[in-house]
Each structure stands twice: as structure tokens, then as C-alpha cells.
Amino acid sequence: MGAVLSVLLFVPVWGAVWPMAAWAAKAAAVPKVSAPPTPPQQGNPLLGREKIDSERCQECHGIDGQGAGHANGPEGKFAKLAGQDAAYLVKQMQDFRSGARKHDQMAIMARSVSDEDVRDISAYFASLPVMKGEPDPKAAAASAIGQRLYEQGDATRGVPACASCHSHQAKGAALAPRIAGQEWRYLDKQLRDWRSGDRKNSPDGVMNKALAPLTDAEIEALATHLASQ
């Protein structure tokens, strides 16, 4: 029995004898290499081009992602999607599907397509030439106010510079979307919804906090500036 225990408790290592407990402790101390995270699946823009017809995305957002003319209507309720970040578009569709972002029609659309469809359609819109704005000479003063808010914010009221997340040229970064050249009425409505809490699907409510102190005139000015880019 003693011989058996000796074999179990001690193992030979290069002519030496190590206690099993010491060997196990040494093995446990070796850092474990974890597998790299799986990269997010990428959509296929060519398939996405085919799918926007079958899913009727172009009826509101346009085949070129620039909005669908008269369909955008006086309320400007349909976003331009051309050149928008694909990951952002995927997240919005997921939020429409889950109810984190409220929109009756988009919730129906999001629930009627697969995850693969969402990735492909998002990749298609992301591949298009970026949305273009149209400066309004009559709104130069408002645009200047909006530009100052966008670039500098207002520290006295706790309003951060929009550029800190959306980039200095409003091209977007990470999950902060491109907003340069977006439709004015759409921007104005979204900013008001963030302020009121009707929309609240930004990480940690950052957009609700940022917009809360702004006046109607400041929101109009901000939308005017961005739509002109």
C-alpha cells in the first residue's frame, strides 16, 4: 500500500521527484489562453440589394438610400440610410424587433425578416454613396448656432459636444451613427424624441441626457446644421 501511495503522490520529472500537489499547483498557475472572440458576421450587400425589393425597404428609404421622395412626407419620418454604418443599422433593426425602439411599421418589418436578411440589407445600404445634405442659405444663423452646439456643446448645462461621439464631421463612429446630411425633419423629430424620452435606445441613455437641456430652437438649429452637411 505504501508503494502505491508513493506512486500516486510523487511523479518523476527529469530524474527528480516532485510531490503531486506541487506539480498540480504549477500546472494550475500556467495562464490559460482563451479563444479569440468570434467576429460579428458580415452581411452580403449584393444579396441585400435583392432583398430590399422583396422586403419593400425602398418604398420609404429609396433604392439609393436617400429617402423616397414624396414618401418622406411633410413629417420627414423616414431616415436616409445611404452610407450608414452597417452595425448601427443592424442594432436599430434588433431594437425595433425587441421593442427597445418604438415604431409600429418598423417593428412589423423587423420581425418579418431573418437575422441574415437584416445583415445583408444593412450591408447594402452601408455600401452606397453617403447621404448628402443641402445647405439652406435662409437658415445660416440657425445653422451657426447648431454648429457651435455640435462642436462644443454647453458645459454650463452639462451638454456634451455631439462631435465627441459622432466625429467632427458627423460621419459617425462605432455605434454612433452618421448624421451629416440626414433629412432635417427626421433629425428634428428624433432629437425631440430623445429629449422627451419617447426614444431611449442609446447606450446608458446617453442621448436622453445630452438632449434634455436643449430648447426647441436649439434642436431646430442642430438639425439644420447637420442636414446641411
Image (tube, grey):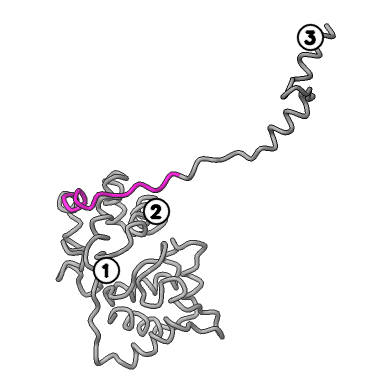
| Dot 1: element | loop
Q: How many marks?
A: 3
Q: Is residue 185 above or below residue 94?
A: below
Q: Residue 4: which numbered mark, if any?
A: 3
Q: Residue 207: which numbered mark, if any?
A: none
- Distance between the Cα atoms at labels 1 and 3? 80 Å
Image check: 57 left or right of 34?
left
| Dot 3: element | helix
- Distance between the Cα atoms at labels 2 and 3? 65 Å
The N terminus sits in image quarter: top right
Where residue 15 sits in the image (x, y, percent)?
75, 22
Where residue 135 sits in the image (x, y, percent)?
25, 85
Which residues fall within the magenta stretch? 38-51
Q: Is residue 221 above or below residue 182?
A: below
- Distance between the Cα atoms at labels 2 and 1? 18 Å
Where residue 109 sits in the image (x, y, percent)?
26, 51
Q: Residue at x 48, y 82 (%)?
A: 153
| Tag 2 residue | 99
- Near-viewer residue (122 or 207): 122
Q: Is residue 27 above or below residue 221?
A: above
Residue type indicated by callout 2: Gly
Q: Please state which of the two labelled residues, at mark 2 or mark 3, is closer to the viewer.
A: 3
| Tag 1 residue | 77
Which picture quadrant has residue 59?
A: bottom left
Q: Is residue 79 magenta?
A: no
Mark 1 burial class by Cα count in 10 Å: few <14, some 14-19, many 20+:
some
Q: Is residue 45 magenta?
A: yes
Residue type indicated by callout 3: Val
Q: Counting residues from the N terminus, which is met first, the one under dot 2 or under dot 1?
A: 1
